[in-house]
Image (cartoon, helix red, strand yellow):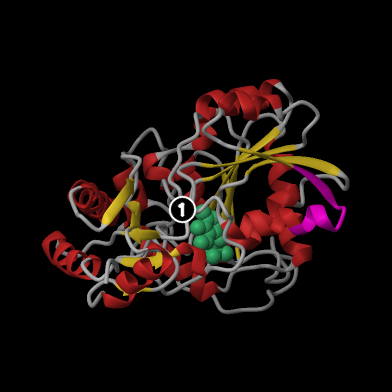
């Protein structure tokens, strides 16, 4: 597999060059989706729940981008579950109360079942997070958070967790490794819903963990791999191939989407139907609150023609959704909050459609 060193190439080159087959006369440029459930005996892998060459190509690429050792999973939530499996029975997790609802619900139900204790924190309150660390087993961070787009002081919090001997995982889905590399800040694990930006075309569900290298790194990787092997939440070869294919254009897509998001965030500030714009200046998600409460926000979502009224984010297609529609969405998300996942379309077309839809909020 071609794995250029991160020092040799810029990230925009890495997304194109990594995870390719070895070069040679007649060699294909791409690793194909390898459809097999098993392998001839006495090779490095004997059964396809343990390994697949298409996963390996994707893992090599994402691992090099994040600066660690990657594992692909059946979904972002499967990757999250693998990380949570590192918490011992009866252990303690420090986690944001305002984060992706799948993580919040998962932790809440695990706590209700008595499997672990959760200390809920506000990731923007660094002192509060630090006060929750003593004796904890895992610090779970998300930055920017979904959907409030709060930013955590990652260098500080990662440093404090390490000092306290607490394992720290960062959900890097919104930022992508092109905008933020948690392992470089000292985090143990970076987690992605590759369903979003890494694949980028709203056509696949897949997750990735990237664990740090160095002391204790191989053990961490081995524990996550064992969870995948025995839990069985493995990605399909076709899905892995689709994510690798999508990754090739990540830099291009993200550049355009971020520019569109910055422009729309600025224009939204001046729209009379918008009462609040949340845009952290990082990434391509913008959250807005509108006049007319939840019903007004629903009217906006129903009135778009170019934007897609759908859940999820990170695709080339611009999408929007009132988040409190989702069961399990934390109460910290305002009822009328609409999350905009800004895509790569022409920004004037996006604005025209969005501003006419916003005119329906007050009716
Ligand atoms: C920040 C974040 N993390 C994790 C997930 C879960 O990923 P998946 O839907 O691929 O299981 C999501 C899904 O929306 C997400 O937004």
- Marks counted in the figure total 1
Residue 231 vertical position relative to residue 87 in the rendered view, above or below: below
Residue 10 vertical position relative to residue 48 in the rendered view, above or below: above
What x and y, as percent, mark residue 43? Answer: 70, 64
In this view, the residue in front, 310 or 47, is 310
Residue furthest top in the image: 163
How many residues crowd around disc 1 within 10 Å: few (fewer than 14), some, or many (20 or more)? many
Q: Is mark 1 within 8 Å of ligand 1?
A: no
Residue 350 visible in image: yes
Residue 193 visible in image: no
Callout 1 secondary element = loop
* Range shown magenta: 109-118
Please tell me whether residue 341 belongs to the stretch shown in magenta.
no
Residue furthest left in the image: 348
What x and y, as percent, mark residue 192? Answer: 52, 53
What x and y, as percent, mark residue 71? Answer: 60, 54
**Hey, which quadrant is residue 230 in on the image?**
bottom right
The answer to whether residue 224 is left or right of residue 77 is right
Please tell me whether residue 112 belongs to the stretch shown in magenta.
yes
Q: Which residue is mark 1?
A: 147
Quadrant, the C terminus: bottom left
The answer to whether residue 305 is left or right of residue 321 is left
In this view, the residue in front, 340 or 192, is 340
In this view, the residue in front, 288 or 108, is 288
The answer to whether residue 47 is left or right of residue 290 is right
Q: Residue at x 69, y 76 (%)?
A: 38
What x and y, as percent, mark residue 112? Answer: 82, 56
């Amino acid at each position: 597999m071609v794995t250029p060193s991160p020092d040799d190439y810029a990230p925009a080159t890495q997304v194109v060059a990594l995870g390719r087959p070895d070069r040679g006369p007649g060699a294909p440029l791409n690793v194909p989706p390898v459809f097999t459930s098993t392998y001839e005996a006495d090779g490095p892998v004997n059964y396809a729940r343990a390994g697949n060459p298409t996963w390996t190509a994707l893992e090599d690429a994402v691992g090099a981008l994040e600066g660690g050792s990657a594992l692909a999973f059946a979904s972002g939530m499967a990757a999250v579950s693998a990380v949570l499996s590192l918490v011992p029975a009866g252990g303690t997790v420090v986690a944001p109360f305002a984060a992706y609802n799948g993580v919040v619900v998962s932790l809440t139900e695990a706590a209700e079942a008595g499997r672990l204790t959760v200390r809920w924190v506000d990731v923007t309150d660094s002192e509060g997070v630090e006060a929750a660390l003593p004796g904890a087993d895992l610090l779970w961070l998300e930055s920017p958070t979904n959907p409030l787009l709060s930013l955590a002081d990652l260098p500080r919090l990662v440093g404090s967790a390490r000092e306290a001997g607490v394992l720290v995982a960062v959900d890097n889905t919104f930022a992508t490794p092109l905008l933020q590399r948690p392992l470089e800040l000292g985090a143990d694990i970076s987690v992605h819903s590759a369903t979003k930006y890494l694949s980028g075309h709203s056509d696949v569900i897949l997750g990735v963990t990237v664990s740090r290298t160095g002391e204790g790194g191989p053990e961490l990787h081995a524990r996550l791999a064992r969870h995948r092997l025995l839990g069985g939440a493995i990605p399909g070869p076709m899905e892995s191939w689709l994510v690798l294919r999508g990754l090739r254009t990540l830099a291009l897509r993200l550049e355009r989407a971020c520019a569109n998001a910055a422009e729309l965030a600025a224009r939204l500030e001046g729209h009379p139907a918008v009462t609040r714009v949340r845009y952290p200046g990082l990434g391509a998600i913008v959250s807005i609150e509108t006049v007319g409460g939840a019903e007004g926000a629903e009217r906006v979502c129903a009135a778009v023609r170019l934007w897609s009224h759908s859940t999820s984010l990170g695709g080339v297609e611009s999408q929007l959704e009132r988040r409190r529609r989702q069961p399990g969405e934390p109460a910290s998300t305002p009822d009328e909050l609409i999350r905009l996942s800004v895509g790569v379309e022409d920004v004037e077309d996006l604005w025209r459609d969005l501003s006419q839809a916003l005119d329906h909020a007050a009716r």
